[in-house]
Every structure is written in C-alpha cells, then in structure tokens.
C-alpha cells in the first residue's frame, strides 16, 4: 500500500484526541480520515488544523466516510461491542482501546463474530506490551536466566480517578492492564482471583473502595499481586517485580528527572498515563499501522481482550462478595491458537 492508511477514530476524549494527534503527527503511514463523537464539538477541537477529516456524531457515518480503511476505537468501554461488530461487517481492521468489551459475555460475542469471519481484524490497546521496560522484562523471563517465575508484585497508582469511576473499575479498567501483562509475561491463564480491601484513603471519593489489593493465581501455580490505588494523590506509578527461582527483576523505577534546588533534590514523578506510557502508545499505534498496511494483524488479540474481561469480571465478583472466585473461560477458537 503506497498511500496513507485512512483511519476513523471513534471517540475524541482523552485517548481519542491523543491518538488523533499521534496519527497526524507522530506515526508514519497513516492519516486521520474521519472522527465520530456524539459531542461533535469535542471531535472538531481534536481535529483542528488537520486537513481532509470528516466529523460525525454517528459511528456508522464515520465508518462509511470516504477514505476510511481502518478504525481506532477510543469510545467508553460499553460502546465498544457495537463499534467492533460494525467494523467487522465492513471488514475494517481495528485497534480497540482496552477493555475490548467490559462484560465477558459481550467480549465473547466479539470473539465469536471474528472467529466466524475466519480472520483476525482486532488488536486490543494493551499498550504495556509495547513499553520498553515491559519488553525487557518479557525477554529476560523468556530467556530462562532467572528460572521459573514464582510471583509478580505489581503496583498501579493514579493521581486521581475520573468523576464517574466506580469501585468495580479499579479492577476492570485499571487492573485490566496487569491482567493482560501477567498473562503475557508468564504465558499462562489466570485461574482464580481474590480481592482484599485495605481501609479506604480518606481523600478518595465517598463510597469508592480505593485502594484495593488484588491477588491472582495462575494455571501453573504462580501468584500475581496488585496494589491498585487510583486516588493516591502524588503520581502515576506502575511497577512490576518478577520473583523467579534464581533471581528477581523489577521495572517501573525509572525517573524522569532529578531536580536540585534550595538545598535539596527531588525526583519528578509522571502525573498520568499519557506521559508514563507515551512511547508505548507511539510504538503500539505504529506497529498497528505497519501491520495493517501489510495486510496483517498482530499484538494483543480479541481472545486476549476476552480473557482479560473474564478475569476482571471474576475480580469484580470477588470484590463484591468476598472470597476466592475461579475464572471460567470459554473454549478458545482455533483462530487464536
Ligand atoms: N490504554 C490506556 O492506557 C487507556 C487510558 C485511558 C483510557 N483508555 C480507554 O480508552 C477509552 C476512552 O477513554 P477516555 O479516557 O478517552 O474517555 P473520555 O470520556 O475522555 O472520552 C470518551 C469519548 O467518547 C465519546 N463517546 C461516547 N459514546 C460514544 C460512542 N458511542 N461512539 C463514539 N464516541 C463516543 C465521548 O463523548 C467522549 O468524547 C476507554 O475504553 C478507556 O478504557 C485507555
Ligand atoms: O483507563 C485508564 C487507563 O487504562 C490507565 O492506563 C490506567 O492507569 C487507569 O487506571 C485507567 O482508569
């Protein structure tokens, strides 16, 4: 394909606007052809200064707009299933922000629809797989130098949560990243989950169970723990330490800058994901554009998205009802073997 890949972006909020900027200015081989957002003013703001983009209130109008060859879904999770199925009907390749679909039943419908097509069209936006630190950890674990992984200790902190954030979203939105990263790093399914509730932070919004401590068991007997704290107030911190039979390795401690002033020194901490994972998003979208232009689909699959939603759903049940909840996955279609 010699011409630029024409992309429709669905949703022009935080992620959608950032992906529009990235496709327009950072990655090569693609252009923004259409944007859909029911808040059309937001879409117009996001494409200000970009030529040749049509703006729509309806998803279907954007998918059918002239020049559209592929889709980025950056609308809220509950809107993903309808958008994915509409893209499949048109045979359009998709980069879908996480979660694929928040409810596992809907995620499975997407998997089944793609399996019926008989070819992959979906890459899920689990961008940590494109982060340089995560990739180094994955290579180290795969090399076997440290022996079998026994545990992952993970930290996931946000400065503050958006106003509509619920206690369930700490698991099915925030921890969905650790679920995918653990499945990918360890090459195993997560089979059971328990959630403990430390006493809530006094500055967390009323009623929000924040922080939470989530414990996963894997098919091969490893354990993965996640401290998730979405109103920590001080920074965006994502860490992961793998403890293996003959060594350990930790990522997430890289510092952005050391500032010295007035008799002291401090290390800056990123304040949000758009800063901490900027390079990962760039590499994720570039990899998607390159693969799409070459007629291939790579990266996290719809099956990975479904598995993450099923594990997260078990986690929400563990949060709400207490105890240990086992994860039941549907049979995996051959397409994702
Ligand atoms: N990968 C990451 O690290 C990361 C970070 C943040 C958000 N996300 C994901 O990105 C998605 C969007 O999150 P956000 O923070 O940008 O949300 P947001 O609320 O900032 O933006 C969502 C936008 O979608 C629009 N919208 C609502 N319904 C729509 C529909 N049916 N079709 C098209 N647009 C619609 C809204 O008007 C809004 O402008 C979510 O799935 C979220 O989980 C991923
Ligand atoms: O949707 C966002 C996003 O996925 C971020 O990467 C994560 O840190 C947040 O907790 C979550 O709310």
Image (spheres, rainbow, N blue to C red):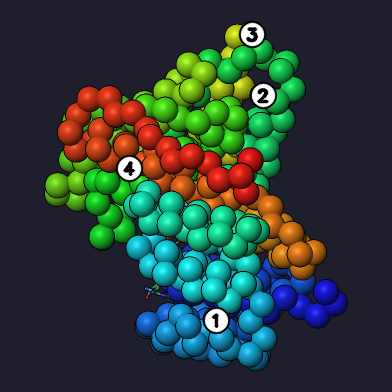
Q: Position of residue 59 (x, y in %)?
A: 46, 80
Name the mark nearer the viewer: 1 or 3.
1
Is disc 4 placed on a helix, strand or loop? helix
Provide the residue designation for mark 2: 141
159 versus 216 height, above or below:
below
Q: Position of residue 28 (x, y in %)?
A: 76, 69
Q: Is residue 86 left or right of residue 200?
A: right
Could you say where residue 166 lies in the image, as x and y percent from the top left?
24, 51
- The residue at 25%/38% (across/down) is 317
Tag 1 residue:
63
Q: Residue furthest top?
A: 246
Q: CA distance from mark 4 to mark 1?
A: 30 Å
Is residue 267 at least partly visible in the picture?
A: no
Label 1 neighbourhood size at 10 Å, few (<14), some (14-19), many (20+)?
many
Pointer 2 or 3: first along the chain: 2
- Of 74 and 336, nearer the camera is 336
* Left or right: 163 as drawn, with respect to 279: left
Q: Nearer the viewer, mark 3 or mark 4?
A: 4
Name the secondary structure under disc 2.
helix
Secondary element under disc 3, as helix, strand or loop, is loop
Q: In the image, what residue occupies the spot 27% across and 46% down?
A: 168
Say whether disc 4 or disc 1 marks the residue closer to the N-terminus: 1
Name which quarter of the figure residue 228 lies in: top left
Report which residue position mark 4 lands on: 313
Residue 246's label in the rendered image is 3
- Image height of 166 relative to 191, above or below: below
């Amino acid at each position: 394909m010699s011409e630029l890949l024409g992309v429709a972006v669905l949703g022009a909020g935080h992620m959608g606007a950032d992906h529009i900027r990235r496709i327009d200015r950072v990655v090569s081989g693609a252009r923004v052809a259409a944007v859909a957002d029911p808040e059309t003013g937001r879409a117009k703001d996001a494409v200000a200064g970009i030529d040749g983009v049509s703006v729509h209130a309806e998803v279907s109008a954007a998918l059918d707009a002239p020049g559209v060859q592929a889709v980025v879904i950056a609308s809220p999770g509950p809107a993903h299933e309808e958008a994915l199925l509409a893209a499949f009907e048109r045979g359009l390749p998709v980069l879908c922000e996480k979660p694929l679909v928040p409810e596992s039943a809907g995620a499975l419908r997407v998997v089944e629809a793609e399996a019926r097509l008989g070819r992959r069209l979906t890459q899920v936006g689990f961008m940590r797989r494109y982060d340089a630190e995560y990739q180094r950890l994955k290579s180290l674990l795969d090399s076997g130098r440290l022996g079998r992984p026994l545990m992952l200790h993970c930290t996931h902190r946000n400065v503050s949560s958006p106003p509509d954030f619920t206690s369930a979203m700490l698991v099915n939105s925030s921890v969905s990243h650790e679920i995918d990263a653990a499945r990918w790093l360890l090459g195993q399914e997560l089979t059971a989950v328990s959630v403990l509730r430390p006493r809530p932070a006094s500055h967390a919004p009323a009623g929000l169970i924040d922080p939470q401590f989530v414990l996963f068991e894997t098919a091969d007997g490893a354990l993965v723990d996640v401290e998730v704290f979405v109103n920590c107030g001080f920074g965006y911190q994502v860490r992961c330490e793998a403890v293996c039979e003959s060594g350990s390795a930790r990522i997430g401690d890289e510092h952005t800058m050391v500032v010295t002033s007035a008799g002291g020194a401090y290390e800056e901490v990123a304040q949000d994901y758009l800063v901490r994972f900027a390079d990962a998003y760039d590499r994720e979208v570039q990899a998607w554009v390159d693969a799409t232009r070459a007629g291939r689909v790579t990266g996290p699959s719809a099956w990975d998205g479904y598995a993450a939603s099923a594990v997260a759903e078990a986690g929400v049940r563990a949060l709400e009802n207490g105890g240990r909840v086992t994860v039941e996955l549907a049979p995996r279609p051959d397409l994702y073997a």
